[in-house]
């Protein structure tokens, strides 16, 4: 196995060039105008699996974007790992804030800049290349199945049904996912918890048409002012969320868990200075690490209404809109929270407006065990390549399908991601370290080695 | 004079066609991409004055859009009326809500549909046509000066300086403006008070870039949530404005004034049903008529930030913006209110964000007297053509330059407008009644007749 690092080094230029080809395809799943590109991306993933040596490669249609499947069954008596990832990406806007065009990847200061470089094309492709490397060098110790989907960024709406209809095909011993981050390049970590998500769009309608704010102002509800009032009322002065029942299912952390979380390396001054903010801001009674990983949140992701062009227009608009998402923690149900939000938001609307709440996708929060064989294998792999034991850490983001793997396939997931929180994965100038990309390709074969060994033991 | 109605009737088709030519020019002053069109509109106004018979017609440059001047001095011993209006219009967006394209005028159900039909091209052109009619029929009893500007919808930023530099040229006995509305077509009224305006744009900046709401959510200020909090805090539960000092200069109405205002015909059920709202909404302790005409307001005219495209994006944005305007009542200074707003808004910003408040234009509130000769002449003119005495009424909108006429030129203004509040003047489907347009052309000559008579008496 000591030759792996050498092999990765020798092939690094090829690995980067092949990834760049994938990064040039704008596979934005949220925006219908990119539909053809998303489909083109599925073909590219299929081709990459075939060329890496996978068998049974196919593009499996769904009511939305297809799921790409491929496998390599070397011996039915060996354990099987199901690798999950996604080939779709977040929208690139606001595009004018990108230093380079989002779908023309460049390397600068050791980082690959492109939409999807870290989330998740770069991390998916590490698995394809690690698989190719193991196969070419006769060091594959397990069976592998790949399942790469195209709707992760829009809620994986069709994945559950695919899992239910393909239980036999997807039969495995565990799921391996690289779609998360580490604490730092010299502080490897493995994600053991993820927040869930409830996402809604709200529309507030006042008068039936835009009005002159001089003629009508003061006399009728202004839907923007009302929307601001309603959103503001969703948190109290301690920034606790005020939706009745919202915290009912939240399990408070034990003192021991809190101590463990807060022992992770974290420098609040460096955090503030990196984000150029005067201070952090969050729920009273919790640290920043607790707030971002273990507490539920409510954030407005977008708001619009009225005149937003240049100059001044004295309009009293008919409508105002917002996209609002809530991150959930273990034991909170996204469907229940969405329902609580909808009922509460409708109940607080004043007489002068009408409110429409439209649910988008949701996702369950997850906690993964640290005493499983797959976790131990991932930890041993990272120790082998990083030279130190990884720290188990809770992440703030959501990968809703981890809960589905457990519920539908009965499989535990290990979240061995190689990104960094500073990769700007949903922002302009998303990037992924060349170090991280190559280190991932180097580490993955060790995962299979240790997984096979530990399973046998 | 009895022949005026006949003359207007005979020429009505010509009057409408000529107005349509002007309505086809998209002279949107707020949007730089229409600059050439605004200038083209100034030329069209100049041509219309020349063809109507005015002398000394010229396009007077300003640092912004030009002011069109023209006059007819028939006898220096006769009184002189300065007619003011504006040839620029509000932006037409949201354009998709127009039934017909905003700059392709059509007549439907007796109404002229087009941006600017009522505000203010239609009302300006009534004066040009009434002037032409008087001149052609030798019935002009006064001197007339026209001053038609192109920046009213963006705050008339260059008008004060023009007045100061042209006091001699603009010397007159009163100012006549048609840029307001009547209570109804069978309830003529003359506007005797107008609210002032303070207009600001605010920018709230949180982290220095868009962030992933899962990774950072709950830990740092979300500028949209903060903006909503700040806007919501600007009014208390009685919808009183909470900015310290905001009401200091407001003169409360006397019981008599309140009784007079509330005696105007107003059907709150018809109002609600016309706007399709469940209820009116406004400051506790005041009626709808008081709220919309005599009380200061604070309305958000536009808001935007984060992801506003299709689908869901879990972004924690770096910035959020709003356009906020306050309607002011007599004795409130727009500059002072803007300053109060700015200081207060900056003071309530939490540590985690930076706030920038940028003032747009402002305007002074005005009250015009009802015992002046010009008011009496306008009232007599309306009685002559509508058959009943007009009601003096306070309007909610703002024509900031009325205060300038008094301060700089020492002239009182009479606001004899022929529109209706339901003309949707800053909204999609702006329209102006054919009845109102022709009735204006018919009424204006009577104004001159009575004004000359009353001045002589």
Image (spheres, coloured by chain):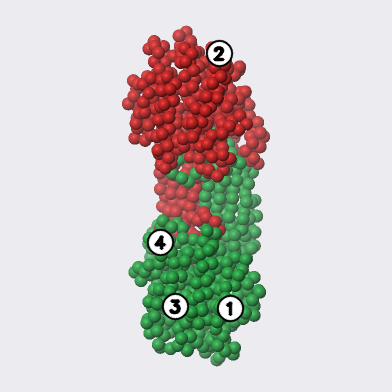
Chain colours: A green, B red
For marks 1 and 2, give the one nearer the viewer. Answer: 2
Q: Is residue A162 visible?
A: yes
- Which residue is identified by label 4? A101
Q: Position of residue A85 (x, y in %)?
A: 53, 73
Q: CA distance from mark 3 to mark 1?
A: 21 Å
Q: Say yes or no: labels 4 and 1 on the same chain.
A: yes
Which one is earlier in the sequence, the residue at label 3 or at label 1? 1
Check disc 3 and report its element: helix, strand or loop.
helix
Q: Which mark is residue A412?
A: 1
Indicate the position of residue A268 as horizontal and vertical percent values: 41, 65
- Where residue A35 sits: x, y (%)? 54, 62
Q: Earlier in the sequence, mark 3 or mark 4?
A: 4
- Quick check: marks 1 and 2 in contact, CB under 8 Å? no
> Which residue is nearer to you in this view: A93 or A345?
A93
Where B78 sits versus B48, above or below? Answer: above
Quadrant location, the C terminus of chain A = bottom right
Q: Indicate the secondary structure of the residue bearing disc 1.
A: loop
- Tag shown at residue B3: 2
Q: Relative to residue B204, is residue A451 drawn left or right?
A: right
Circle 4 or circle 2, nearest the eye? 2
Task: In the rendered view, tell whether residue A315 sits above or below residue B217.
Answer: above
Label 4–label 1 contact, CB within 8 A: no
Label 4, label 2: how far apart the Cα atoms are: 70 Å
* In the foreground, B375 or B311: B311
Q: Residue shown at 49%/17% (left/top)?
A: B133
The residue to which callout 3 is attached is A440
Q: Residue at x 64, y 70 (%)?
A: A161
């Amino acid at each position: 196995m000591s030759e792996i690092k050498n092999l990765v080094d020798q092939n690094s230029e090829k690995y980067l060039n092949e990834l760049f080809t994938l990064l040039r395809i704008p596979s934005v799943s949220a925006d219908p105008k990119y539909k053809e590109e998303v489909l083109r991306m599925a073909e590219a993933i299929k081709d990459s699996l075939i060329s890496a040596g996978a068998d049974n490669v196919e593009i499996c249609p769904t009511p939305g974007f297809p799921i790409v499947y491929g496998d390599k069954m070397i011996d039915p008596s060996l354990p099987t790992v199901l690798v999950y990832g996604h080939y779709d990406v977040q929208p690139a806007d606001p595009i004018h804030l990108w230093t380079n065009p989002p779908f023309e990847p460049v390397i600068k200061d050791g980082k690959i800049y492109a939409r999807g470089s870290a989330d998740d094309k770069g991390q998916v492709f590490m698995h394809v290349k690690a698989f190719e490397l193991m196969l070419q060098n006769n060091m594959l110790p397990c069976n592998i199945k790949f399942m790469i989907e195209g709707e992760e960024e829009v809620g994986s709406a069709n994945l559950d049904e695919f899992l239910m209809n393909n239980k036999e095909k997807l039969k495995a011993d565990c799921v391996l996912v690289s779609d998360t981050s580490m604490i730092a390049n010299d502080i490897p970590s493995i994600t053991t918890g993820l927040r869930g998500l409830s996402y809604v769009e709200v529309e507030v309608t006042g008068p039936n048409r835009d009005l002159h704010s001089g003629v009508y102002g003061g006399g009728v509800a202004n839907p923007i002012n009302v929307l601001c009032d309603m959103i503001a009322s969703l948190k109290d002065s301690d920034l606790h969320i005020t939706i009745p029942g919202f915290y009912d299912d939240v399990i408070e952390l034990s003192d021991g868990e809190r101590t463990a979380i807060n022992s992770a390396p974290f420098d609040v001054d460096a955090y503030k200075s990196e984000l150029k903010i005067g201070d952090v801001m969050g729920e009273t009674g919790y640290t920043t690490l607790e707030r971002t990983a273990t507490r539920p949140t409510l954030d407005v992701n977008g708001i619009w209404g009225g005149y937003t062009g240049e100059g001044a227009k004295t309009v009293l608009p008919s409508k105002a809109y917002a996209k609002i998402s809530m991150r959930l923690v273990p034991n909170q149900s996204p469907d229940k929270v969405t329902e609580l939000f909808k009922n509460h938001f409708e109940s607080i609307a004043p007489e002068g407006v009408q409110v429409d709440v439209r649910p988008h996708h949701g996702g369950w929060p997850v906690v993964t065990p640290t005493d499983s064989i797959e976790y131990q294998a991932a930890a041993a792999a990272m120790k082998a390549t990083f030279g130190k034991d990884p720290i188990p850490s809770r992440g703030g983001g959501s990968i809703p399908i981890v809960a589905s793997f457990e519920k539908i396939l009965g499989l535990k997931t290990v979240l061995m991601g190689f990104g960094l929180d500073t990769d700007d994965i949903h922002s302009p100038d998303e990037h992924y370290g060349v170090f991280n990309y190559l280190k991932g390709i180097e580490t993955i074969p060790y995962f299979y080695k240790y997984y096979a060994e530990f399973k046998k033991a």
